[in-house]
Each structure stands twice: as C-alpha cells, then as structure tokens.
C-alpha cells in the first residue's frame, strides 16, 4: 500500500486491498448463494486450524457451524435487518472442537442488485467463551425491565431451553411462579439498586417449579438513564427443599462457628428461635451461643461430653442441657450434636438439633413422687422405643390394685376400654358425673348441722359437673384436682365423725374415687405412649428420607409377615382420637373384621400414621373422618375421607403432593405445620408393598353450584394381599 504525504493531510494514492485483507488479524470470508466458501483469508484458515486455504475453499460453510440451525436463523435475520453485527456463535474447527467467534455479515449483490452471496467477519469471542463456560446463569434485561436481551447457556438450560437465542427476546415475567414475586423483586431492586443472593420462586417453560438465588444490579447508559438490569441466577431448588424441611421441623436445628474466642450462631431454624424466646431466627444469627447457656459450668460440661463422644467416633445424643431464653427464663432441652471440623481435623464449631424437654422433666419429677409408680419413672423417660412396654406394665399394676381393692367387675370394665385414651377420657368424665350425683344424694339425707362441710361438697359438685361437660382436654387436670379435694374432705369428715352412720356410704364413694384416680394415671400412660408414637413416626419419616438419598427403592429391604390389616388401622386410629377430639372431629371406622395380608407391619403402620394424621390435621371442625375398607379379589383398599383444607388439581396431576418437602398451596396457615415428608413416605411404603395411593380433592358446592370450602378429600390406598 503506497501513501503520499501532502500539506497537512495524508492522501491515499493506491491501496493494495488484497494484501490488506489477507493480513487482517480477523477472519474474512465470502460464500455464494449455495453457502459454498468462495473466498477466505489466512486468518480464517488459522482460526479454524486448517493448514491451507484450499482445504476451506469449496466447502459449504454450514459444515463449520457447531449448531447448523444457526445459519438459517442468521440468514432470516439478515433479510429482515440487511446486516447483523457482533453475534457470538459456536463454530467448530478442523478437529470438531467448539470455538467461540463473534460474527458480523451482510449480503453481496451484483451490478443489477441481485443477491449473489454473503460476506462476513469472524473475531475470536474470548469474553463470550468465558461467560458461556461459567457455572452460573448470566443474563441481561432490557430497558423495558422484562425482556431478555442476553443470556448464557446456563440460563437457557435452567428454564428448559437448549440454546440462549431461544430465550433472548422473551419476557422474564413468564418464568416467575407468580407475577407478585417479580414485582417484589423489581421493587426491592429499585429501592436498593442491587440485590444479592435473594431466593426467588420461578418455573421452567414446562411449568416445573424451581427456586433460584438471584443477584442483580441496575445498569445505566452514558447519559445516566436506566437501561435495564443484569445479574446472575443459580438453581438452589434442592437446597431450598432441604432448608424448607429444616425450617418447618418442630425440632430446633442450629449451627455454631468459631470466631476468635467466641462461638457464633451461623444458622438456626424457626423452632430453635421460638424455643429460645425469639420471634425471628434472623435475630439469633451472629449471637455468641454461650449467652444461651444457663451457666459457664454447664456449658463446659456439655462441651467436654461433646469432645468425649467425638473421640469415640460418635455423636452426642439425647444430652440434657439447661438453656436460657431471651427473657432470662431457664428451660430443659435434649440435644443431639456433633463437632464441625476443617480439612485438617481441627474443630471449627458444632451443629445439631434441640428439643424442649421441660414437660418431660416435670413429668419425671411428678412420677417420682408417686410411690405406686416410682419404679416406672426412669422407664417413662427412657428412649421412645421403650415407653409402650413400660406403659403396659403400669396398666397391669393398676389392674392388680383394682382387682385387689374393688373386685373383678372393675377389671371387666377396664378390659372393655382397651388401649384407647379417648374412651378412657369419656369414662373418667362419665364416672365423675356419677360421683357428683351420689354426692348430691348424700347431701340430701345429711344433717344440716355440718354447714361448712356441706358447703364444700356443693362447691365441689358444681366443679365436677363443669369440668365433666367441657370439651377441652386440659380440663382433665382440673377435674382430677376437684376429685382429690372431694376425697380429702370426705376423709376429714370420717375422722371427725367416727360414730357417723354414713361411714359405709362415704367409704363406697372413696373407693370409687380411688378407682377414678387410677383411671387418670392410665390416661396419662396412654397419652404419653400415643404422643411418643406420633413423635416416633415424624422422626422415622425424616430418618427414612435422609437415609434414602443414596439408595434405590430396591435396596430397601422389607420383611413381610401375614397380619390382620384391620388391627393395624384400629390401633393407629385410637392414637389420633384425642387429637381429633380437640378439633371436634370424630373418626369413623368399620366394625371388627379379619383382613389378613402380607405386610411389613412397622412400615405399614407408619404409612397409616401419616395418612390419618393428615386427615385430622386438615379437617374442618365438626366434620367427621370416614375410613372404609374394601376386600377385593387379590387386593384390599383403604379409603380415608375427610372434609377440610383441599388440594389443588395441578398439585395432584403433577404428583407435587408426593414430592418430599412439598406442602400444598392451600395448607400454609399458622395452625397447621408440617415437614412435607408424610405423603412422600406413605406412597413409598405403599409401592414397596406393591400397592399405590390415589388422591382426589374436590370443593364442596353450595346450593347454586359454586365451589366453597371445605374440600372433600379422598385418599385411596390399594395393597396386594400376597407378596410375590
């Protein structure tokens, strides 16, 4: 190229364009209307790792595209816009390896304006290559605050696409689970200018729901005008499910990290915060956990026990620890804990779960003061698995006392009650009314000279009737206190009136009160047992779920034995009758029947626990639960029907209700907590038995046919009678 210098200017005399183009550091090419390469420079030969230009000339350019569909798409774009600029594409070199090139191109026309091919420029897209290879989704939204103008492959895959261009130009609004979520996110960004690691509920193009961690910042043009936003998205759906399980667990969960000489709380769930007297878990993050220990000595004992358990390769389990609430109040907890260590084995903190054991500790103290059940106190506080055995032993002791004191008729009555605390409760209240009536008869024939004594009895009679008619379970405590006061008053009267003609009558009433007191202790034993069974089911659900992460269904071994399915249903229903009674809900089951099937009894009862617990929890007041059993040719079917909180059709159709950690959209309120594990465990057990679970939920219509609450929900479990 020759250039002559004139006065104050450079004048181009002659340019060797061929030499100029050949030595450009970018690829230059031209193709004919059939897409055949008719020209390329040396840089293009080098970019595609060929050894000579002749290898490329005559080749169809589509063979260089990594995604052949890109060529037709770009031709369409050129026909609309005449030219396209700086579009990053995936190409492939001679060995087939993917390369990233920024492409610009336009049509070539002859002298008559007829299209005869295309000419383009290829530049190494190193920046785009870095962006596309990142593990996080990177995006840019345009000035309208809704349209994707740029996205990397991670974003495309995240929302169910195969290529970024499929999502570019689309509205981001359609990918939010609900538009309210998008408006909240944009509102937060508008206020703060930048958002980091914000959990956002979104959905794929096929409707599948996901949760992403979104970071975003507002971008401005050269004039300072807002021109959109850009940021990153990271799929945290699985982490979110696990966190949700932890958040909704009734057991407190926490983690502590060392920082200098302090032990700072780095994580805790709602249950932990509420246990410690805090309304929000966020208020505990960063607090030194030593502030929650009752004293330094108690904290040192706990740490020593933790270190000792760790030295033996074990976790510290069921450790009783006195803890201090925010208000300064002390309470007892049971803790399962383990040390956290770095890669060198040094302790950097601890994590675990915590349960409020105050009630259990008080109960242990109360039982210790009772001579007739003193030897059972330790067993009642033993692990959940031993509680039922000890409660049964206690029942036998009480039966022996009743037979010795009151004779065989009372034993017959007790045997008819069975192991049902609800029936026991009703018996206690009915017997209290009977005693109140006897006391009224006693007053009617008693001398009126004993005014103070009679006044006391009349007051106690009113209390007996009041507490016997109440529906609250807590009134059983007040009822027993009144019964004991009656007993004390009658004993004092006998002591003062040794010559009284009413000693035999009073003695009979005292005997009845003694029997009633034993029924009360039986009621405590049964309710403790039933509560422990419910707690055991929740713990076993979580354990089964966590232990099953790395196992296939066929790896879980069940031992099948022939058992009466009806007995399993009856046993489980009896456990939940008190819970149902508190909600003014009754559970109806068919009469006794023999319905033998091969089952893994412990697991099948756990399945029934989960289904019946849900039915009671989500039932409306004064709406009975019906359980029906169908004896089919080769199968049996159990149908559980309740009225109350419903399930949306899409949650059933997409199988969402059986996903671990998922809770129905209609079930989120302050009175109904749950882990979202019950149904997923139930269907797993049913299918392991060779059966299945089908759920339907339909809103009950009013007189005009409009849907209204409650919903009629049916859960139908089908199980084979024999296992192959």
Image (spheres, helix red, strand yellow):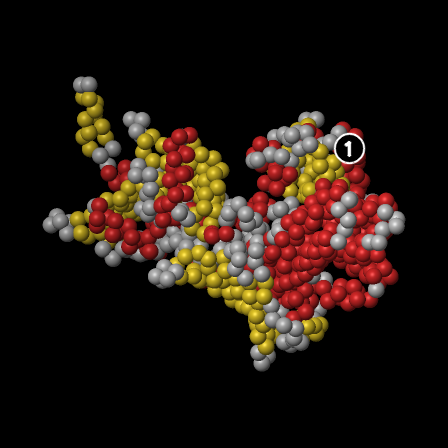
Q: Position of residue 709 (x, y in %)?
A: 44, 56
Q: Of residues 605 and 142, which is closer to you in this image?
A: 605
Split into 4 quadrants, where in the image is the C terminus?
A: bottom right
Label 1 sits on a secondary structure element that is helix
Q: Residue furthest top?
A: 8
Horizontal side of 488 relative to 141 (left or right) equals: right
**Residue 486 in sight:** yes
The quarter of the displayed image where residue 300 is located: top right
Is residue 287 shown above or below 455?
Answer: above
Q: Residues within 10 Å of mark 1 (few under 14, many from 20)?
A: few
Q: Of residues 350 and 641, which is closer to you in this image?
A: 641
Q: Residue at the spot x=84%, y=56% of the render?
A: 504
Residue on which the image places disc 1: 298
Q: Residue at the spot x=54%, y=47% of the render?
A: 671
Q: Residue at the spot x=49%, y=57% of the render?
A: 644
Q: Residue at the spot x=19%, y=26% of the render?
A: 11
Q: Residue furthest bottom?
A: 633
- Count of numbered circles on the image: 1
Q: Of residues 96 and 384, which is closer to you in this image?
A: 384
Horizontal side of 416 relative to 150 (left or right) equals: right
Split into 4 quadrants, where in the image is the N terminus?
A: top left
Is residue 562 shown above or below 711?
Answer: below
Is residue 665 shown above or below 587?
Answer: above
Q: Position of residue 186 (x, y in %)?
A: 38, 37
Q: Residue furthest left?
A: 112
Q: Position of residue 532 (x, y in %)?
A: 70, 53
């Amino acid at each position: 190229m020759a250039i002559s210098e004139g006065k104050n200017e450079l004048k181009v005399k002659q340019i060797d364009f061929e030499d100029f183009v050949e030595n450009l550091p970018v690829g230059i090419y031209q193709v004919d209307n059939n897409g055949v390469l008719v020209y390329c420079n040396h840089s293009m030969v080098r970019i595609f790792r060929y050894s000579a230009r002749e290898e490329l000339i005559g080749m169809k350019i589509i063979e260089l595209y990594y995604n052949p569909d890109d060529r037709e798409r770009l031709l369409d774009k050129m026909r609309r816009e005449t030219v396209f600029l700086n579009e990053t594409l995936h190409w492939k070199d001679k060995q087939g390896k993917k390369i990233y090139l920024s492409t610009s191109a336009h049509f070539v026309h002859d002298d008559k304006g007829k299209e005869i091919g295309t000419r383009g420029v290829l530049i190494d897209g190193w920046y785009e290559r870095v962006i596309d290879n990142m593990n996080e989704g990177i995006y840019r939204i345009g000035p309208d605050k809704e349209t994707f103008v740029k996205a990397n492959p991670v974003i495309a895959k995240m929302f169910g696409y195969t290529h970024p261009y499929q999502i570019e130009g689309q509205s981001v609004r359609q990918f939010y689970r609900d538009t309210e979520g998008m408006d909240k996110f944009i509102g937060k960004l508008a206020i703060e200018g930048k958002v980091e690691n914000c959990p956002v509920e979104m959905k794929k193009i096929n409707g599948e729901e996901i949760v992403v961690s979104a970071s975003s910042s507002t971008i401005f043009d050269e004039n300072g005008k807002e021109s959109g936003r850009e940021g990153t998205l990271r799929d945290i759906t699985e982490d979110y499910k696990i966190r949700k399980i932890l958040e909704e667990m009734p057991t407190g969960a926490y983690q502590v990290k060392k920082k200098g000489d302090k032990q700072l709380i780095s994580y805790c769930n709602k249950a932990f915060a509420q246990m410690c007297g805090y309304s929000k878990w966020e208020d505990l993050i960063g607090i030194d956990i030593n502030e929650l220990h009752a004293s330094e000595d108690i904290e040192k004992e706990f740490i020593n026990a933790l270190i000792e358990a760790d030295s033996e390769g074990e976790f510290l389990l069921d450790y009783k620890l006195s803890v201090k609430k925010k208000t300064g109040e002390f309470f007892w907890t049971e803790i399962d804990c383990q040390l956290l260590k770095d890669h060198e084995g040094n302790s950097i903190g601890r994590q675990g779960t915590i349960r409020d054991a105050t009630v259990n500790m008080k109960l242990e103290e109360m039982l210790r003061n009772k001579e007739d059940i003193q030897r059972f106190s330790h067993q009642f506080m033993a692990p959940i698995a031993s509680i039922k055995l000890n409660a049964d032993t206690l029942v036998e002791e009480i039966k022996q006392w009743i037979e010795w004191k009151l004779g065989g008729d009372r034993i017959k009555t007790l045997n008819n009650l069975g192991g049902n605390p609800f029936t026991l409760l009703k018996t206690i209240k009915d017997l209290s009314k009977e005693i109140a009536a006897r006391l009224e008869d006693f007053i009617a024939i008693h001398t009126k000279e004993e005014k103070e004594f009679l006044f006391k009895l009349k007051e106690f009679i009113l209390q007996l009737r009041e507490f016997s008619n109440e529906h609250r379970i807590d009134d059983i405590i007040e009822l027993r206190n009144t019964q004991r006061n009656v007993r004390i008053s009658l004993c004092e009267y006998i002591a003062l009136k040794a010559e009284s003609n009413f000693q035999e009558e009073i003695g009979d009433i005292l005997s009845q009160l003694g029997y009633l007191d034993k029924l009360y202790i039986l009621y405590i034993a049964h309710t403790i047992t039933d509560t422990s069974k419910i707690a055991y089911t929740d713990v076993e659900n979580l354990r089964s779920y966590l232990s099953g992460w790395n196992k296939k269904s066929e790896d879980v071994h069940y031992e099948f034995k022939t058992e009466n399915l009806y007995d399993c249903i009856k046993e489980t229903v009896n456990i939940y009758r008190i819970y149902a009674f508190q909600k003014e809900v009754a559970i109806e089951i068919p009469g006794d029947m023999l319905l033998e099937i091969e089952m893994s009894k412990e697991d099948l009862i756990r399945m029934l626990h989960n289904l019946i617990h849900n039915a009671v929890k989500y039932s409306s007041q004064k709406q009975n639960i019906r359980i029906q059993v169908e004896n089919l040719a080769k199968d049996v079917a159990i149908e559980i029907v309740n009225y109350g909180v419903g399930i949306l059709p899409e949650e059933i159709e997409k199988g969402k209700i059986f996903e671990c950690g998922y809770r129905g959209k209609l079930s989120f309120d302050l009175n109904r907590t749950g882990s979202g594990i019950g149904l997923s465990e139930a269907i797993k057990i049913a299918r392991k038995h060779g059966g299945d679970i089908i759920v339907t939920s339909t809103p009950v219509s009013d007189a005009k046919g409009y849907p209204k609450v409650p919903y009629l929900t049916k859960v139908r479990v089908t199980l084979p009678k024999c296992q192959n």
